[in-house]
Amino acid sequence: MSNNKGDWLLEGRNIVKRFGPITSLDGVDFQIGRAGQAEVVGLLGDNGAGKSTLIKVLTGVHPPEEGQLLWEGQPIRLDSPRDAMKLGISTVYQDLGLVDTLSIYRNMFLGREEAVCSQIGPFGFLQIDKARSETKKALEKTGITVRSVDELAAKLSGGERQAIALARAIYFETKLLILDEPFAALGLKETAKVLEMIERAREEGVSVILIVHNMNHVYPIADRFTVLSHGRLAGSFSKAEKTFDELSEFIISGSVVAETD
Amino acid sequence: MSKSALVRLKEFLANRPEGGAIVGVVALFVFFSLGTEHFLAVKSFRSMLTLAAYWGIAAGGVTLLMISGEFDLSVGSMLGLSAMGVAIMVNAGLPSPIAVVMMLIVCVAIGLLQGLAVVKLGIPSFIITLGGMLLFRAITYLIHLVVVQGDYVRVPQDDAFYQILSYRFESGFNITPLWFLGITVILYLILHRTHFGNWIFATGGNKLAAIQSGVPVNRVKVILFGLTAGLACLAGIFEMTRFPSVGPQGGKLLELYLIAMVVMGGTRLIGGYGSVVGTVFGLAMMAMMKNGLSLMGVSAYWYNAVVGIIILIAVIVNVNSQRRALGVRHE
């Protein structure tokens, strides 16, 4: 995996995604993580602007009709979430990250059980003890305390769920973390905790795409902003280019411009 | 600080899917032991064991499939078809091991096809396998009518391969429960100790989260439809070898009793939660009811009424304990 200077960690060029007669993304360009430099990018825009669709293209849920994805400068195809996970793209969806009927430690390794499997002949068996202790370690590292890793996810609060989903995403050699409305179900204290986790992830070299409605949450922590409007790129700025107010206004007026053209 | 044993037992039972079924088994056991004098006899135990083993070979597949969030209503018909198919093939001169393997391949293929139809067409498994249930039963009757003109199909009792499947010991005990035990242990290991088992729970528990975690949920379901059909086929063959002849009605309505036993064992009807061990307790409950009520001389009409009521009670208890274990957030 070479990472030439100037290559982005993940780049989307001219992405087009249609659902039947509806064009959700109409030639969108997107970049994150220039030259191995971890950054937090806020993905902004009104409802229906195409944020969620773009995320789903970047994570292999919906392969695009047109356009090209590049990972560290190399063209790639993402046909399933598994493809994206293999590259190091982890996604935490709003309240969809965990399986309620599974214990915390089983959620932790869901889809990546090979990390705690021992091979006996052709069969891989879960090492329950290892899975439990690794889960404890990962949660401690991210500063989360739970009563027991054997507890079912159904018993957790919204904040605990979000924190565990995040801890899981970070645990597996993630290079790019995508968070869809991570604060939606959280209280003040829990929001602060998740913000802290995002900052810690960036320090450890993980780039983060944040989809957040509340500008108050995303402005302080993001390095750059990409604004979508009606399926098109309305603009992309670093924090130095726009103040909080200017950016807020741009999102509103950007929508207006796109509507009239 | 140490809690009393009773409190701990209560906690244990409340936090496990099979908790309610354990209580049910104990209650029915005590009731029938006191209520009939022959319930505790070896002969009674033997017949319950054989019955539970026959059901249980098919019930394991039904359990895993239900945990993944799907049903198979064609299990009973599949079982009847496989018994009839193998018996006829052997009578036509095919060696029994080859007939059994051929039937297994056919049944697994049919199961996989039903699974593919469910995931690819997006039609609920209830409908797809209801079609299968009617179709396979009709095919069994047609084969029966055309090949042997509606006569009973004889099953050779001295066939060496059949002996391996259902050998009867001097004591009168049958070897089938050992097969059931082996299959159950394997299914237990798959469900609780392999990544595939984790995927089964996740597929039934939260399909979207499973997909986003990289679990191939459709493949999981299709494989489980194949497994369920294969085990139903095996159950049919085991049952067939115990009797001197076979008719086209084998396994009729069994799919519903199997679902009842699996749910009585604590597996959640909509998936995501359950256990193979619980199903064993569910089987034990049903076998005890069938045996105990007939020992008590209960008539067939009352028998169905009592079984129906006990199934209802068991399911209500389990649904409540599942609500407690899983919270009510998403219900």
Image: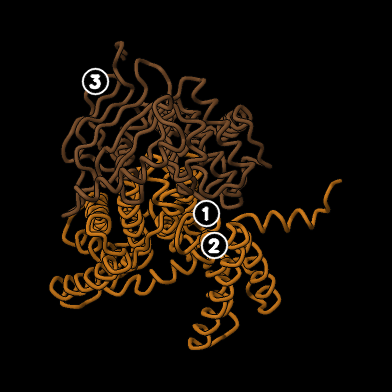
Chain colours: A brown, B orange
In the image, is residue A20 above or below residue A2?
below
Disc 1 and disc 2 in contact, CB within 8 angstroms = yes
Q: Mark 1 to mark 3: distance in Å?
A: 46 Å
In the image, is residue B237 above or below residue A202?
below
Residue at label 3? A74
Q: Residue at x 55, y 44 (%)?
A: A161
Of the pair B138 and A165, the residue shown nearer to us: A165
- Chain letter of disc 1 in the image: B
Question: Tag 3: Cα neighbours inside 10 Å, few (<14), some, or many (≥20)?
Answer: some
Q: Residue at x 40, y 51 (%)?
A: B207
Instruction: Check disc 1 and give the amino acid type.
Output: Ser
Residue at label 1? B275
Residue at label 2? B265
* Residue B99 appears in view: no
Residues behind callouts 1 and 2 on a single chain:
yes
Q: Residue at x 46, y 20 (%)?
A: A205
Q: Splitting the image into 4 quarters, where does residue B235 fall?
A: bottom left
